[in-house]
Every structure is written in structure tokens, then in C-alpha cells.
Amino acid sequence: MIKCVILDDELLAISYLKLLCEQIEEVEVIKAFNDPKIFLNEIENIDCNVCILDIEMPGMNGLQVAELISGSKKIIFTTAYKEYAAEAFDLNVVDYVRKPIKKERLTQAFEKAAELLRKSHKKDFIEWNTNIGKTVIFTDQIAYIKTSEIDSRDKDIMLNDGTHIILKNLNFKSLLEMLPTKDFAQVNKKEIIARSSVKVFSTNEIITTILSENDHFLKLQIGEAYRTSLMEMFGK
């Protein structure tokens, strides 16, 4: 599923883009903005993977916005002007769609974005906003993930060396899409375990290689909804 956010200074253009997106399968418009500054203030806290940016906007143009977010979002530019094409592709964007936009052309751009997203999920790292700022975390260093006890919207990642990092405003579904499928599994509603951290398992419980505060190995209860997929993962 592509979750997109639209940025265009013209309200009619936003309405038209929303209408087109609603007609394209596997595309959902999460939010739309007509002010680049408000967009930049909020974008890192929005669960989306594609941004549709107009280029010609007052104050700050789409190229400037793209420079700030291209590391974390796939970008599709829309514009009535062809002279920005070379500069746009220097930013490694997904596509450059000329106005007036047609459904078929926008569909093509989303198909490119979907393919790039599929490939990006195969990376050996994730990149997200954390308690220490925008952070790259290598997946082979992750031992265990749980829902934060302070804010359920956040996720507490424990690394192999015991370091804790808080992923801000990220749900498990989106997080699992970023992680290598063969290496991680959701155990229950609040916990994900790295396969490399599993010591012993039964149909109800996983004993991990992670030491808890009382020097016992951390135990995780397997949720009923996740038991079948876990058993399949471990070849049972």
C-alpha cells in the first residue's frame, strides 16, 4: 500500500490530485498541505512513504522541500513547467509529472514508487526519526522491539549491545514492512523479536538470549494471532 501526502499551494490542484488518487488501487492519501513550512513541520510524524510535491510554490519551492526529505520519502514532482526536469532528477526522485495531470500518467508514477519501495524493504538498515534525531539503524544489530511504555505510538528498539533507541510515531505494520521478513517476527501485540535472539521456543512462549534485569533470560508470551506464523517461521 502506498500512503501518500500531497503538497501544493493551490487548493483546486490538491482536490484534483486527491480525486485521481482515489481512483488508483493501493494508493491512500493520508494528508494534504498547501504550505511548505507546515508540511515540513509535520511530515516526519506522518505514516507515509510517498510525497507528491508541486514545484512552483511561493516562499519555498518543491525542489527545496525535496532536498530536506528525500532521504526518508519517495518523491513524485508535479509541475506545469518542463525546465525543472534535470534539477528534479538530480534529487533522485521517483518521477516528474507534467500538469495537467492524467490518471494514467499518475498511475505510472505510483507504479515506479511501489517498485522502489519493494526494493528499499530489502535494505539492511532502517531510517527513521528517533529520540536522538533522524537515525540509521542496521537491522542485524536489532535484538528486540517493543511498544514504548511511555507513549504507545513509539517503539523501543533494543540493540545487541543493550542500547535502547526510541522510534517515534511508528506502528508495527509499517515497521515490519521495513524489516527483513526472514529475520524478524511479531510475537504479540506489543513485541517483535529478531530470529537471532531466540534461544528456545514452545507453542506458548519464547525464551530469548536477552538478559533481563534479574539476570534471567527474557521470556515472551506468544499471542494466539501470531502463533501460526511463528511456527512456520521456525519450520514447525
Image (spheres, grey):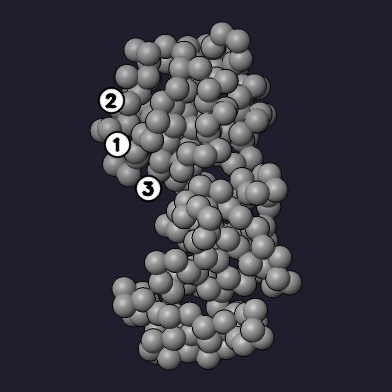
49 and 203: which is toward the camera: 203
**Label 1, label 2: how far apart the Cα atoms are:** 9 Å
Residue wearing tag 1: 24
Which residue is outermost to the right? Answer: 161
Q: Is residue 198 visible?
A: no
> Tag 3's secondary structure?
loop
Residue 217 % position (x, y): 60, 86
Q: Is residue 45 above or below residue 105?
A: below
Q: Say what amino acid the circle numbered 1 marks.
A: Ile
Q: Amino acid at mark 2?
A: Leu
- Residue 187 as seen in the image, left or right of residue 27: right
Return the x and y of residue 166 as percentages of the image width and height: 61, 55
Neighbours of disc 2 within 10 Å: few (<14), some (14-19), many (20+): few
Q: Quadrant of residue 41?
A: top right
Question: Which residue matches tag 3?
Answer: 1
Q: Which residue is mark 2?
A: 19
Which amino acid, mark 3? Met
Crowdedness near tag 3: few (<14), some (14–19) or many (≥20) residues, C-alpha within 10 Å: few
User: Residue 26: where, in percent of width, then height?
Assistant: 32, 44
Find the residue positioned furthest to the top: 58
- Residue 213 shown left or right of residue 119 in the figure: right
Report the mark closest to the observer, 3 or 1.
3
Give above or below for 32 relative to 183. above
Secondary structure beneath dot 2 equals helix
Labels 1 & 2 near each other (Cβ < 8 A): no
Answer with mark 1 or mark 2, whichever residue precedes in sequence: 2
Where is residue 104 shown, x and y percent of the image?
Answer: 33, 29
Distance from Cα at disc 3 to Cα at disc 1: 11 Å
